[in-house]
Amino acid sequence: MKKVNDERLKIKQLKNIKLAFIFENSLILLYLIIQAWQSQQVFKQVLTWNNPLWVVFILTMAILGILEQNVTAAIDDHPKLSTKKLLIFLSGQFLIYSFLWAWLFNFQRLWLALICGGGVALVVTGVLAYNNVYRSKQ
């Protein structure tokens, strides 16, 4: 059997994979909603790291968000960010996310809020720095 190298078929196959991915994750999300509805305690029983469906859903969405950067950054027409601007973004995000985590922890565990806020700020700024590779210097 001869291998087919038609671009239209490759694009169609990618669209089919995308549709299957959307369908699969919609079913996982629907099942999680049904679990939460039945248990009446959403955060204590369903949305925990002990629930394998929740872990799969969250990790899949995180991986999808990271992998999408290759495509979205390449087609954006934004100018490159300077190192100074990236550091300003990092410090601003660190302050905002640390405050949000401290608020979630009822200002009881400030050291943990700083670690969590720093981690989120590093990931978001890392994605911005990664996208800088694909941007023009305008």
Image: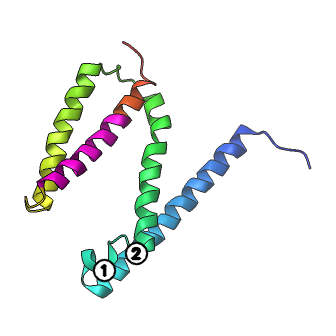
Give the residue drawn at x 15%, y 44%: 96
Q: Would you place residue 117 above or below residue 133 in this image?
A: below
Give the residue drawn at x 54%, y 59%: 21
Give the residue drawn at x 24%, y 23%: 85
Q: In the current view of this chain or complex, which residue is farthest to the top?
A: 138
Residues tagged 2 and 1 counted as in contact (Cβ below 8 A): yes
Separation (CA) of disc 2 from disc 1: 8 Å
Task: Give the residue at mark 1.
Answer: 45
Task: Report the predominant secondary structure element of the magenta stretch.
Answer: helix
Q: Quadrant of residue 88?
A: top left
Task: Give the residue at mark 2.
Answer: 51
Q: In the current view of this chain or complex, which residue is farthest to the right?
A: 1
Q: Which range of residues does the magenta coloring cover? A: 110-126
- Front-most of 113 and 76? 113
Amino acid type of the residue that numbered disc 1 sits on in the rendered structure: Gln
Image quarter where the C terminus lies is top left
Q: Secondary structure at mark 2?
A: loop
Q: Whole-percent x and y of residue 111? A: 15, 52
